[in-house]
Amino acid sequence: MTEAARRPLLQIIVASTRPGRVGEPLARWFGEYAREYEAFDVEIVDLAEVDLPMFAEPEHPRFGRYVLDSTKAFSATIARADAFAIVHPEYNHSYNAALKNALDHLNTEWARKPVTLIGYGGVAAGARAAEALVPVLAALQMVVAGTVPIPFAGQRVSGEGDARVFDPAPETEAGAKVALDGLASWLEVLGLRGSR
């Protein structure tokens, strides 16, 4: 497939790094849903597997002069994406430290790319975490193209280990469709949208 004909790459970032996290089956579900949408190539980026150290680069990330191999590898991964979906929990009315660390590691690799936020938690469904994320993403020159709040997400996950699956409520699927429409619209504005 030529560069002109390729579909945009949507990276789904699993923000939680905790054992048994709900974000992993949620990310797999959204990945399958996005593949069926047929406008994107889809890749899941799991921050637990990326395993970044606490940010320790000697220079500001805007210069891109990384010295740590972990940062160089993460930079190459994120740079190839055209859009993102961040699957994030809510901890103490905000988002988790592993996600902030990942965002802070890079700069231009995030810039001018649309993102949708898939928040989960209890009754608030990650809404306070999403609200806290918005100014950080704006500082990175990203545009939030949609949100998919999922209340009590853990109650909709069944199975064990890697076989756990998320069974979305109808309103969650509807929200996912709206979020993907938003990403596709922004990519079209940027001249990167593939054919559906």
Image: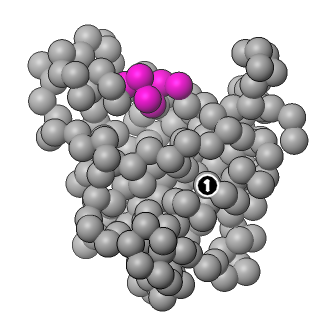
Where is residue 124 drawn, in percent x and y? 45, 80
Residue 69 visible in the shown view: yes
Q: Is residue 78 magenta?
A: yes
Q: Please rate how many residues cluster around mark 1, counting C-alpha atoms within 10 Å: few if below 14, some from 14 to 19, many from 20.
A: many
Residue located at (28% from left, 32% from top):
105
Question: Image quarter for residue 183?
Answer: top right
Pick the residue in front: 141 or 91: 91
| SS at mark 1 in the image | helix
Q: Percent x, y for residue 86?
A: 48, 52
Q: Give the residue type at disc 1.
A: Gly
* Image position of 26 with respect to 66: above or below: below
Q: Quadrant of residue 51?
A: top left
Q: Is residue 83 above or below residue 89?
A: above
Q: Is residue 133 visible?
A: no
Residue visible at 73% across and 80% down in the picture? 170
Whole-percent x and y of residue 134?
45, 51
Residue 124 vs residue 3: left or right?
left
Q: Which residue is mark 1?
A: 31
Give the extent of the magenta segment.
75-80
